[in-house]
Amino acid sequence: MAEVTIAAPTSGPVAAESADHSALHRMLFIALAAVLVVLPFIPVIGYPFFLMKVLCFALFACAFNLMLGYGGLLSFGHAAYFGFASYVAAYTAKHWGLTPEVSILLGTASGAALGLVFGALAIRRQGIYFAMITLALAQMVYFFSLQTPGFTGGEDGIQAVPRNNLFGVLPLGNDTITYYFVAVIFLVGVLLIYRIIHSPFGQVLKAIRDNEARAVSLGYRVAQYKLAVFVLSASLAGLAGATKAIAVQLASLTDVHWSMSGEVVLMTLVGGMGTVFGPIIGAAVIISMQNFLAGLGAWVTVVQGVIFVVCVLVFREGIVGVIGKWLKKPL
C-alpha cells in the first residue's frame, strides 16, 4: 500500500501562521543562544559546573519529549540510554585516554544501539504495557551496571573522569571552555530535535500520536516510525549522558537508576510536554531546586512533589504550554 504524504500548506492563512510561528521560534533560539553566552558572567547562577549540569539534563529532557510529546510513547526507562552512554564515555576517556569528542560519540552510539534493541522489543506493545517493558529493560541495565564493577566501578561509579584536550587542542580542564563546549552540543541537539519535529517525519509522528488507527489506514508503517523515533530519542539521551560524564567528570549508578527515568518525566511535564522549549525550562527548574535546596536534604523530593502537584493543577499544559496558550502561539 502506498504511503500518503502529509504536505505543508504553501499559501493562505495557514501558511502565513506557520511562517509567523517559525519566525517566533527563530527569535527564541537566537535569544537562547545569547543567554547561553552571557550566563557564566551572571552572579549567583553563573557557576559553570551547575550550568553544564542543567544543559545536559535539558537535552536529556528534550530527547525524552521527542518520544513522548511528539511520538506519544511513554517510556519509564530512558535512564538506561542516558546512564549507559555516560559509562561508555567515562570509561573510554579514563581507561583508553580518548579525546572528549570521540568518547562522546562512542557514548552516543552505545545509546543508539541500546535504543535499537530495546525499541524493537518494546514497540510490540502499547500503552502501560509498553511503559512497563521499558522499565523492565532499564532495570536490566541497572543491575548489569551494579554487577560489573570492572566496567562501571560498581557502587563507586567512574570518578575523576579526565577532560582530555578537545580535538587534541582545546584544554577542557578549564571550566569555562567546557561550559561553552557543552552549550554548543546542547544547542545542536535541540536544533536537531526542532528540525525533526517540523519535518514530514515529524508530521507523521504527530498523526500517529493523535490517531494511530487512522495513520495505519492511510498506509503508514507505524511500527517503523515508532522504532525510528525511539532510536532517535535514545541516541540524543545518550548524547546528553555522555556529555554529562565528561563535563561533570562522573558516571554513577544514579544515572541508570529508575528514579532518573522518573526525573526526566517530571522535567518534561513541568516544562510542557509537546513543546519545543518546555523540557528546557522544566530541567532548569528541577536541577535548580536540587542545587539551591540541597540543604533541605530529603525534603527536596517533597518540595519537588509539591511543585509537580501545583503544576498539574495550575499549569496543566506545563509552564511553557500555558504561556504558549496565553500567547496563542505554540512554543
Image: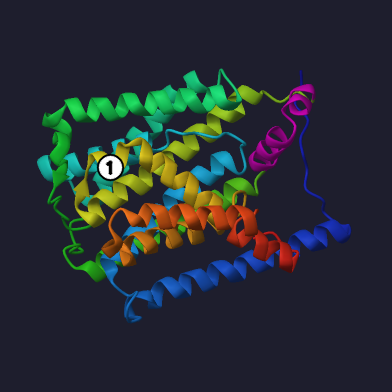
**Looking at this rendering, what residue extends furthest in the right direction?**
12
Q: Residue at x 67, y 23 (%)?
A: 221
Q: Position of residue 97 (x, y in %)?
A: 12, 45
Observer-nearest residue: 227 or 318?
318
Is residue 207 one of those drawn in magenta? yes
Q: Is residue 213 left or right of residue 311?
A: right
210 relative to 243, above or below? above
- Which of these two is toward me, 270 or 252? 270
**Quadrant where the image shows the C terminus:** bottom right
Q: Residues within 10 Å of mark 1 (few under 14, many from 20)?
A: some
Look at the image and say whether residue 240 sits in the magenta stretch. Answer: no
> Which residue is labeled 1 in the image?
254
Instruction: Name the main secondary structure of what is drawn in magenta.
Output: helix
Task: Reply above or below: 160 against 140.
Answer: below
Residue displayed at 48% across by 48% down: 266
Choose top left, top right, bottom left or bottom right for residue 70: top right
Judge left or right: residue 190 versus residue 182: right
Residue lying at 34% horizontally and 56% vertically, measured from the top left: 299
User: Nearest the camera: 110 or 256?
Assistant: 256
Residue 181 visible in the shown view: no
Residue 179 in picture, x, y percent from top left:
30, 65
Quarter placement of the N terminus: top right
Q: How many marks?
A: 1
Up-down relation of residue 99 to residue 87 (above or below): below
Q: Is residue 182 above or below residue 86?
A: below
- Which residues lie in the magenta part? 200-217
- Percent position of residue 298, x then y: 30, 53
Whether residue 27 is visible to the viewer of this picture, yes or no, is yes
Q: Amino acid at mark 1?
A: Thr
Question: Which residue is at 73% across, 36% downward?
Answer: 210
Image coordinates for residue 171, horizontal then vertical, percent: 17, 64
